[in-house]
Image (cartoon, rainbow, N blue to C red):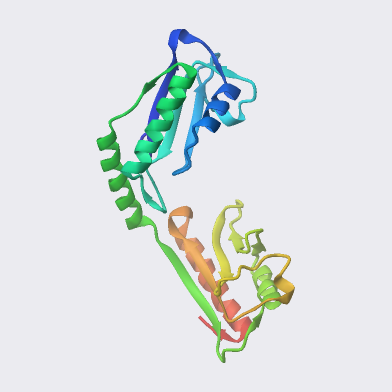
Amino acid sequence: DKRIHYVAVLRSEGGASISAEELMAALRQFPFVNKPARWQGKNLTDGSWEDVRSSGERAFNHFQVGVQLANRNGPLTSNDLETFIGMVKNVAVSLKLQAELPDKDAALRHAEALDAFCAQVDVVMDYHVASKDGAPLAATKVRALAEAEGMTLRSDGLFVARNEHGEDMFTLSNGEPRPFMPDQVRSMTTHSVVFSLDVPRVKDVIKALSRMTASAQQFAHGVGGIV
């Protein structure tokens, strides 16, 4: 999507087909890891774009690759873009492809503007729940109360509350650096937990905030703590 990516186009000279494996071999030779990038090939039959990495043995004569202009680590920098363009050019030479590259300066200006916009709307709302007397909270108690609120523990150590459509609404994390890993909960304690609502990732923010508020208050009551 050109609104959020710098998109380079590569076409084969004379329309010769390039297999997905040939492209993957070239990418291993000229890697790019600075920002998330996605390669697509145009289907020779119906003209649709598809992810090259999951296309199996399919061949293409027309590719596009997009690198994100901004993410939570900031906007695409001049060095990032130079590295990306260098990778595209090297792949093009290796596979005898013609590369079409958008204007670099315009892309960097757009990256800065996109990052500024994201900073305005990228809001996370937190409730901290702590014990009143500073006594440690058993992680098993945290888990029991979280599950009573309909939350499930993910493999990354976060409890997550989902809506009726299975979409994430908010999370519950350890207020201390150590996450609630499923195989370690029985032996853990903590002094606080954090309920977090990632505003731009939730469709119905008012509904999610209302549920998170009620869950945090109920949790605080359950542990004899304060919000």
Q: Quadrant of residue 10?
A: top left
Q: Quadrant of the N terminus?
A: top left
State left or right for residue 198 relative to residue 111.
Answer: right
Expressed as whole percent of the image width and height from the top left, the position of residue 30 reads: 49, 32
- Between 40 and 200, which is closer to the camera in this rendering? 40
Residue, x 49% and y 73% (percent of image)? Answer: 127
Residue, x 37% and y 42% (percent of image)? Answer: 80
Does 213 appear above or below 74? Answer: below
Does 123 appear above or below 64? Answer: below
The answer to whether residue 1 is seen in the rendering is no
The answer to whether residue 28 is seen in the rendering is yes
Expressed as whole percent of the image width and height from the top left, the position of residue 65 reads: 45, 30
Expressed as whole percent of the image width and height from the top left, the position of residue 26 reads: 53, 26
- Between 46 and 217, which is closer to the camera in this rendering? 46
Residue, x 63% and y 85% (percent of image)? Answer: 136
Does 2 appear above or below 56? Answer: below
Q: How many numbered discs, if any?
A: 0
State left or right for residue 148 relative to residue 108.
Answer: right
State left or right for residue 158 relative to residue 201.
Answer: right
For this orientation, the residue located farthest to the bottom is 133
Expressed as whole percent of the image width and height from the top left, the position of residue 157 reads: 63, 64
Residue, x 50% and y 76% (percent of image)? Answer: 128
